[in-house]
Amino acid sequence: MTAQLSLDTSDQPGVDAGLLEKFEALQQMKASQLQDLYFDLFDRPTPSRNRAWLVRRLIYRIQEQESGFALGQEAQERINELSQNAVLGHRKLGAVPKKEKAPKVEKARDPRLPPAGTTIVRLHQGVEHRIEVLDQGFNYLDRTYKSLSQIAKEVTGTRWNGFIWAGLGKTKKGI
């Protein structure tokens, strides 16, 4: 949904009717057409594909060209002179810097876990479940799991905090 600009100029004498027609034509154009027009008027590709933004920028540029109120040559030269020494944080259009991956750091073993080789026995609905603690993960029914929560979900069919389900975590009184 794009915002429509109000082009009612009945109370503004001196507004060029030809300019109004151009504005109304912009409102009817597709985004791809607006991008092409942007390139024609600015001599560079658009930094945005947002239709509302394109319409606003194009209307401003058309007004600027029609009225002749663009920056003068002297102002343009001064801007260029100042920008020669400026440090700008802009990147090339379409260029996305790649993030460097941090080196993998092995996670410390959770202190709540019993030592590797320990067997956790859990009774659930009359069935005894034996879970062997490994250096990295758990062994249950000859399958390796990364967490007790995965085992608890397989056994109960619902999500659980694995430590609480296995009787290793703190519980509320009476539970």
Image: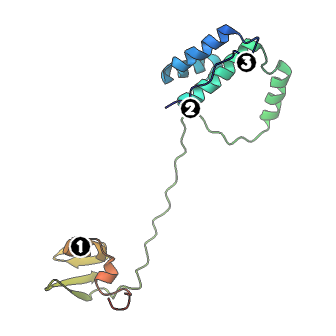
Q: Are marks 1 and 3 in contact (CB under 8 Å)?
A: no
Residue type marked 3: Glu
Kindly state the secondary structure of the residue where label 3 is placed.
Answer: helix
Q: Nearer the viewer, mark 1 or mark 2?
A: 2
Q: CA distance from mark 1 to mark 2?
A: 49 Å
Residue 82 marker:
none
Q: Position of residue 151 (x, y in %)?
A: 24, 74
Q: Nearer the viewer, mark 1 or mark 3?
A: 3
Q: Residues within 10 Å of mark 1 (few under 14, many from 20)?
A: some
Residue 6 at what x, y percent from top left?
62, 23
| Quadrant in the rendering for residue 143 | bottom left
Residue 138: quarter of image: bottom left
Out of 105 and 76, give the one closest to the viewer.
76
Alpha-carbon neighbours of circle 2 within 10 Å: few (<14), some, or many (≥20)?
few
Percent position of residue 137, x then y: 30, 76
Residue denoted by label 3: 64
Label annotation for residue 48: 2
Q: Is 161 situated left or right of 47 in this image? A: left
Is label 1 in a helix, a strand or a loop? strand
- Residue position marked by numbered label 1 in the rendering: 144
Q: Position of residue 28 (x, y in %)?
A: 51, 18
Q: Are marks 1 and 2 in contact (CB under 8 Å)?
A: no
Q: Amino acid at mark 2?
A: Ser
Judging from the image, what secondary structure is the residue with disc 2 in? loop
Label 1 is placed on what type of residue? Thr
Judge by depth and name the residue closer to the eye, 82 or 23: 23
